[in-house]
Amino acid sequence: MKEEIREELVGHILPFWMKLKDEENGGFYGLVHYDLSVDKLADKGAILAARLLWSFSAAYRVTGNSEYLDYAHHAYRFLIDKIYDHEYGGLYWMVDYRGRPVDDRKHVYSQSFGIYALSEYYIVTGAQEALDYAVRLYRLIETKGFHHERNAYKEEFSRHWKVVPNEKLSENGLLAEITTNTHLHILEAYTNLYRVWPEEEVKDRLINLLGIFYHRIFQKETKFLKVFFDKDWNSLTDLKSYGHDIEASWLMDDALKVLHLEKEEYKQMVIDIAYNISDHAVLQDGSLANEKEGDRTDVTRVWWVQAEAAVGFLNAYERTKDEKFLVLTKNLWEYIKNHLIDQRQNGEWFWSVEADGKPEQRPVVDPWKCPYHNSRFCLQVMERVGEG
């Protein structure tokens, strides 16, 4: 399985994205339609740009292929030169194909991906400038984006860092003032930052985030995570996001390992979430359902959900040595191979597959559809399984 996954990364996923390098305007093309036609004039989002920087940096770190480092350099320059707001700080939500802001809102979620990517780039380059920008984004989140009284991270801001309604990260007909998704990716970003900048303040913020998950987000009775909240941490809906739960399981465990934090209740939370998702979300074909709202289960097989579940189950196996999780990981890979990987020439992964087995005709690349989840899945397997 490991060799198949390595080949998927180096022979399929990364070459797909390498072809999208925009030599004329910088960065990478921001839209590839379902029919695989490339829109070279499409806008370019901060999330996609940061995830590309992370993916090529991490791929170089794991494989040693210097070609990936060249693409990381290219991604870095666009992120810093065009998407970073050098007047007011932070990353714009969206720029046009030439790098001019078209949506200058700042979201804590996208700032966190900037930290995540810049920290990874620093790991492989040692470029002090990259670390400096990562720390700047960290300080922006902590000074502008954290509400001390509520012990919660805010969501969306104007260019000038005035709070605005959280339109970008609210879903399911809600307008949430606090989201699990944003907190999860701050945790992820700070974990990577702490690897390269092990300051006590970052450690304190990570420990606080783990406490937020344990006391505010994790439901000890059901073992699910709550998803959307009002400003006072009241849950807004009965929604279970299976992909976010299993992703949170291994990302929280990653934070525990980086911190060398031996807190039994947190380790148990990680394990409980993995078992819970294995009991409630795995479908007969080995894939993972998307979510459940009330009594309605959405069985769409979304690309990132499958990728994160495979890593989450592999991590759970390492924690528990329960062979069940290895079987689940292998079954997910079989599903991904047979249904999600786009076998068309110049394809990558489909956005999702419907219950009837047909791919949903959504873009292959857009501001959210990126290489981070599937490239990270491949890299995690390659690192965790080991050589030989």
Image (cartoon, helix red, strand yellow):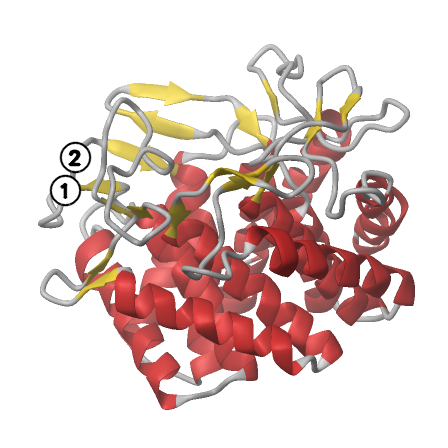
Q: Is residue 114 above or below residue 245?
A: below
Q: Which mark is residue 114?
A: none
Whether label 2 touches label 1, CB < 8 Å: yes
Other residues around mark 1 within 10 Å, as few (<14) / some (14–19) / many (≥20):
some
First of labels 2, 1 by sequence position: 1
Q: Which residue is mark 2?
A: 236
Q: Horizontally, is 9 left or right of 254 in the view?
A: right
For the residue marked with disc 2, what is the amino acid?
Answer: Leu
Residue that appears at 80% across and 19% down: 37
Q: Which residue is mark 1?
A: 230
Which secondary structure, mark 1? loop
In the rendered image, which quarter contains the C terminus? Answer: bottom right
For the residue marked with disc 1, what is the amino acid?
Answer: Asp
Other residues around mark 2 within 10 Å, as few (<14) / some (14–19) / many (≥20):
some
Q: Is residue 25 above or below residue 236?
A: below
The answer to which quarter of the image holds residue 73 is bottom right
**In front of the other: 227 or 43:** 43
Image position, residue 131 (x, y; %): 57, 77
**In front of the other: 280 or 225:** 225
> Label 2, label 1: how many angstroms apart (C-alpha)?
7 Å
Q: Horizontally, is 361 left or right of 296 in the view?
A: right
Q: Is residue 349 above or below residue 5?
A: above
Which of discs 2 and 1 lies nearer the camera? The answer is 1
| Numbered label tally | 2
**In front of the other: 126 or 369:** 126
Image position, residue 201 (x, y; %): 34, 84
Asked whether the viewer can see residue 315, the reply is yes
Residue that appears at 28% across and 49% down: 223
Asked whether the viewer can see residue 268, the reply is no
Which secondary structure, mark 2? loop
Residue that appears at 71% across and 20% down: 33
